[in-house]
Image (cartoon, rainbow, N blue to C red):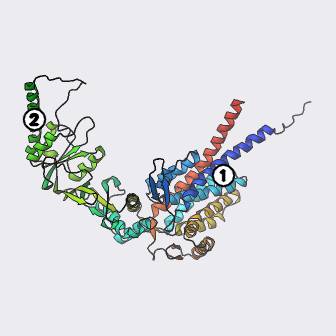
Amino acid sequence: MSVLQKKPQTKKTFETSEKHKDVRMSNLINAKSVSDIVRTSLGPRGMDKMIQDGKGEVLVSNDGATILSKIKIVHPAGRMMVDLSNSQDVNAGDGTTTVVVICGSLLQAAIDLLDKEIHPMKISESFRKAEIEGQKYLKEMAKPVKLIDNDSLLKAAETSLSSKMVSQFSNIIGPIAVDAVMKITNPEVDTNVDLKNIRIIKKFGKTLEESKLVDGILFYQKIMHNAGGPSKIENAKIGLIQFQLSPPKTNMDMKLVITDYNKMDRMLRDERRYLIRMCKKIKDTGCNVLLIQKSILRDAVTNMALHILAKLKIMVIKDIERDEIEFISKTLNCKPIASIEGFVKEKLGSAGLVQEIGTSDGKLVQITDVPNKGKTVSVLIRGSNELLLDEAERSLHDALCVIRSLVKKKFLLPGGGAPEIEVSYRLREWAETLKGEEKMCVIKYAEALEIIPYTLSENAGLRSINVVTELYNEHKKGNKTMGLNVKKGAISDMWKDSVIQPFLVSSSALSLATELTGGVRYFTINFSLFIIIIIIFNQ
């Protein structure tokens, strides 16, 4: 009678298991290290990062998505954190640093739980349940806002700008952002905002205080004055063409050799007549402003055509980029014209005034009194240097996204770490109803959310542990709106201090961070198994 004996575990199996854990831990640590890079940039007292790329260009910013997009991260888990920040930027527009910091804290919680031999699947499931429960608590503390409440929108925009390098100009950028979004939005109907309808033009010179909102279009391109054409047109009839005002060329790569002077004169006369016919047809429709799309095949307009158009008192603006066509058409209510045969009066746009305005860094073309007010707007940003201009543009974009978030989800939350502390406290209470490993995971998840007020106080030079403890006690008493006012260096009511933020920003950050935390663990398991398979195959 044979006796089945249990095969003892070999050294090879033990080494394989250890490699599995090492790869998993390596990926978690690499992902968390990306979070540590931007953590010091969180909040109004967060530090700006100066980044120099391979070409020697310097970038100064504290925007999480911008910083991470400029850093070359090779490790796959680290690149997932960059994608996380970009996802938050697309979904909410703000909170790109917050989402990465929360995710880094959740990854550290996952590392602690893995050290206690809790299975990754159990951790992922528990974190997901905690996130769903946390979303309920966020909704309970959110307050509805009406889009006609301009004061609340302005406070939300200024809160977003408070952590930017241009925060001292929040009283300028904030109102511009609110007015820009509300001009292209119907508060009663719209549930989203297309920010492509807001054109941002940067121009060097003066200060940010000179920035302004324009009901119309601004162009970097200049008016063509070569032949003495007009520089100002009132009651403009505007044509947008995508064909060339130049002599035609053969369809094939051919050369035309002329040896007779008479034939040369005839060719030049024919070219002139051809251009005159085109320009007269344009003039006959009543067009007095011509926008010409940039051409890469041949000259979009010749000097001869410019001379003829100037004689006909038609203003010419050339080199319009292809990606500007849709914005121009929507603003001026005109249609792009692909050929001279299709140039008809019905396709022209209109505007009250087209003129050239001077700046210290050159001239701009401004079109105002457009018929379709409420469809598009333009913003002119001024600044004393290129770094400030770039940061002002990013800050304005974030402020625009904050208002867009309120159009999507019309709810506001207090800032200063109040939502994170409230969710953390409520999750601890909920964890008491759970048992075993699930309870441990939920408690760790709750502790991880304390990273936001902890980091805000740390970057402000305050005693982080004391601040978090005091905040926790305030929320335990039922004071849900108590948060850290970094500028005062004390805990106060965020609603009274006008430190507020869109519900969508916090909700999206919590959801995306939790999702990626689970994804990194799945990724590490599969990645480690992939390495084991390669090792076995090579042997």
Element assignment for label 1: helix
Q: Residue at x 40, y 66 (%)?
A: 157
Query: Residue 538, image x and y in percent?
Result: 69, 30
In this view, 126 is above or below 456: above
Upstream in sequence: badge 1 or badge 2: 1
Query: Residue 41, image x and y in percent?
Result: 52, 62
Neighbor class of circle 2 (other Cα within 10 Å; few <14, some 14-19, many 20+) is some
Q: Is residue 524 visible?
A: yes
Q: Residue at x 46, y 71 (%)?
A: 499
Which is closer to the viewer, label 1 or label 2?
2
In the image, 487 versus 295, the foreground residue is 295
Q: Residue at x 50, y 49 (%)?
A: 83
Query: Residue 40, image x and y in percent?
Result: 55, 62
Instruction: State the residue lying farthest toward the right.
Output: 1
Please tell me in which quadrant of the rendered image residue 362 appears. bottom left
Spatial separation of the CA atoms under disc 1 and disc 2 = 80 Å
Please tell me in which quadrant of the rendered image residue 450 appears. bottom right
Please tell me in which quadrant of the rendered image residue 281 appears. top left
What's under tag 2, amino acid-wise?
A: Arg
In the image, 231 versus 145, the foreground residue is 231
Which mark, residue 61?
none
Which mark, residue 122?
1
Element assignment for label 2: helix
In the image, 490 versus 405, the foreground residue is 490
- Per the image, the residue denoted by label 2 is 272
In this view, 194 is above or below 208: above
Q: Are marks 1 and 2 in contact (CB under 8 Å)?
A: no
Q: Quadrant of the N terminus?
A: top right
Q: Count numbered badges in the picture.
A: 2
Neighbor class of circle 1 (other Cα within 10 Å; few <14, some 14-19, many 20+) is some
Query: Residue 312, image x and y in percent?
Result: 8, 46
